[in-house]
Amino acid sequence: MPASPLHDRESDKKTMLCGAPVAPASPAEVREDRQFRRQMVDRELLHGPNTRRREFSLLMGVVWDFLKGFRQLHFVGPCVTVFGSARFAEDHPYYRLARDMGAELARMGFTVMTGGGPGIMEAANRGAKDVGGRSVGCNIHLPFEQSHNPYLDRWVTMEHFFVRKTLLIKYSYGFVIMPGGFGTMDEMFEALTLIQTGKIKNFPIVVMGSEFWEEMRRFIDAMVRRGTISPEDIDLIKWTDSVEEAVAHLQEKAVRQFGLQVAYGVPHGSRILGEKDLAAAERGL
């Protein structure tokens, strides 16, 4: 059988990925790489091929992360997720804005969900507790310590970022984007992509902090002008610094989505399985 064109290209030194021979790694470099990967399981998962046994073990770790999240968050009630930076202290205007937003979300009847950490996440959870609302967090293990904030009724800590992000979206009927960094942008565009591609319904997205996000808003408008996204792709984004405007937008868009969910039946915890929704916990059941 004649060799395939791909086989010919692979055997051609001119088409190899590296023109020069790759220098072998030293034992010290190998030890350093292994030590790096052992510090966090995501590093090993994303490192490349592992042994079959290790790949299966990593897969089971992902399944376990999902199971923990499903068990803890399945009965917390309808959520709105607040995304934002962990780096704002409580005297910062954005912290105060997120706290006010969390309080209003709780008054609407939503459970406030965040990444469970400090900064904006803490502020939104704290706002919910200020008014007697429900507050949950989905935290992440990091090489540096990030403990959950003290304003949570229930929380779960994930090993994998992508599992955490899935859970933060899965249980939410709307998203509030506060000022933040790479992670906040990743979460925002993940939600937008899922809406754009029809993976989830058109849940509302509120972006707060107009001055902070000014350049990003211009860039998104430029993508519309250049045809890389459609005008309707951003119809559900509400750009505002007003808590009242954000609440009105969520009232119009998110509450309707929750009404559809009620038609299918809202899940309640099973006492036989040791499950409790937050409402039952509040009643002391």
Image: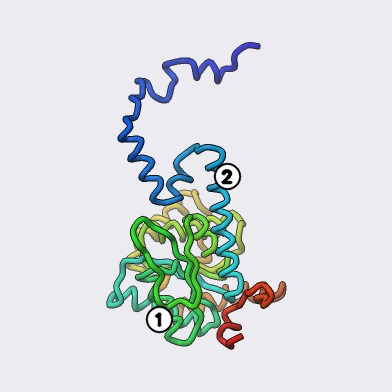
In the picture, the quarter occupied by the N terminus is: top right
Q: How many angstroms separate mark 1 from mark 2 (CA)?
A: 45 Å
> Residue most toward the left?
91
The quadrant in which residue 145 appears is: bottom left
- Residue shown at 50% from the left, 82% from the top: 106
Residue 231: x and y in percent read: 52, 58
Classify residue 258 as left or right of residue 231.
Answer: right
Compared to residue 3, the image places residue 78 above or below, namely below
Which residue type carries mark 2?
Phe
Report which residue position mark 2 lands on: 56
Is residue 265 among what the camera can see?
yes
Total labels: the figure holds 2
Q: Which mark is residue 100?
A: 1
* Numbered disc in front, either 1 or 2: 2
> Looking at the image, which is closer to me, 154 or 108?
154
Compared to residue 264, the image places residue 131 above or below, namely below
Residue 23: x and y in percent read: 33, 24
> Looking at the image, which is closer to me, 278 or 198?
278
Residue 206: x and y in percent read: 47, 70
Q: Are marks 1 and 2 in contact (CB under 8 Å)?
A: no
> Looking at the image, which is closer to me, 244 or 181?
181
The quadrant in which residue 232 appears is: bottom right
What secondary structure is marked by label 1?
helix
Q: Residues within 10 Å of mark 1 (few under 14, many from 20)?
A: some
